[in-house]
Image (tube, rainbow, N blue to C red):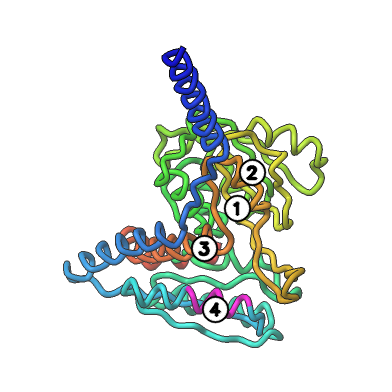
Amino acid sequence: MAAVRTLRKLCQHSQHQLCKLHTSASRQEAVVISGKKLARQIREEARGDLEKWVLSGHRRPHLSVVLVGDDAASHSYVLNKTRAASDVGISSETILKPSDISEEELLDLIYKLNTDHRVDGLLVQLPLPDHIDERAICNAVSPTKDVDGFHVVNVGRMCLDQSTMLPATPWGVWEIIKRTGIPTLGKNVVVAGRSKNVGMPIAMLLHTDGRHERPGGDATVTISHRYTPKEQLRQHTQIADIIVAAAGIPNLITADMIKEGAAVIDVGINRVQDPVTGKSRLVGDVDFEAVRQKASFITPVPGGVGPMTVAMLMKNTIKAAKNVLLYPPERIRMAASS
């Protein structure tokens, strides 16, 4: 009898341990992807690439940033970009212009920077005042200096799977996915948001052919937007292997909308009031704390996609410096005036 009681206790103990293991496995939280850590790696790569370029006899790349108006967020973003440039070894300047600058004056400034051989990379910080046509400004920047990747030529080349200046935020999302080892081939992806600078390029990078000149992710991509009914969005996200939230809506993606083990990339940047402290804070488009209980990977806000955007901008600036060898000045002037 003693032997039977001992055996019964052992069985009960084993079942208890198995239960504990099952419970801990089911409650395992998502891996929080550090965009800061990945961005540091990319900036180190960029720094090494740049030093080789300079040691081979080339001039150090120069980035010109045009900042219009007094928007606090824009000033903060530009400061982050120029600090990153200094860290990598890129010289930079910020050209401040008042919010009442005319579109014609801004276009004149861009033309001068386009034709200045000392300027390798050029970006105009968005958003711009309402009286200025942002698309006209983006298309005025020479495509060979367009480190934002917003010129129609660069957008077109991206859509045709050709090598080009990729928009920094979508490229950052792509690098997060690839460097983290999240598989995309044949996977279902939902991109929430269809903006021409973020949502659309992310979808392009993820669904296009991995065998092409600019390799894509070979995923099946669904794009949602403001007119997608919430219930329909839920139907798509519940079968998605990867969700990229880029709609600018706090808590758009909640835990009940994702399947176990999905990867969630949060591109949203929203300023909300903290109900406890009463102070404003940054949040993404994803209910982070709840979703991390079900996801396999998740990016935080802040500290996720944001640092990657800046890192990819540095890579584009170095690419722009090298493109000077491929595009003679007369071709740059033709592209800028087209």
Q: Which mark is residue 167?
A: none
Q: Is residue 251 above or below residue 270?
A: above
Q: Earlier in the sequence, mark 3 or mark 1?
A: 1
Name the element at disc 4.
strand
Q: Specify the amino acid type for callout 2.
A: Val
Q: Which marked residue is nearer to the observer: mark 2 or mark 3? A: 3
Please state which of residues 127 and 20 is positioned toward the viewer in this rendering: 20
| Residues at marks 4 and 2 touching, judged by CB atoms closer than 8 Å | no
Name the element at disc 3.
loop
Please state which of residues 33 and 321 is positioned toward the viewer in this rendering: 33
Cα separation, mark 1 vs mark 4, equals: 28 Å
Q: Residue at x 38, y 68 (%)?
A: 329
Q: Is residue 10 above or below residue 237?
A: above
- Say which residue label 2 marks: 191
Q: Specify the amino acid type for callout 4.
A: Val
Q: Which marked residue is nearer to the observer: mark 1 or mark 4? A: 1
Q: Residue at x 64, y 34 (%)?
A: 259
Q: Is residue 56 left or right of residue 220?
A: left
Q: Is residue 325 left or right of residue 145?
A: left
Q: How far across and how far down the image is residue 203, in percent?
A: 59, 42
**Residue 314 occupies which quadrant of the picture?**
bottom left
Q: Specify the amino acid type for callout 3.
A: Gly
Q: Residue at x 49, y 79 (%)?
A: 112
Cα separation, mark 2 vs mark 1, equals: 10 Å
Q: Quadrant of the C terminus?
A: bottom right
Q: Which mark is residue 303?
A: 3
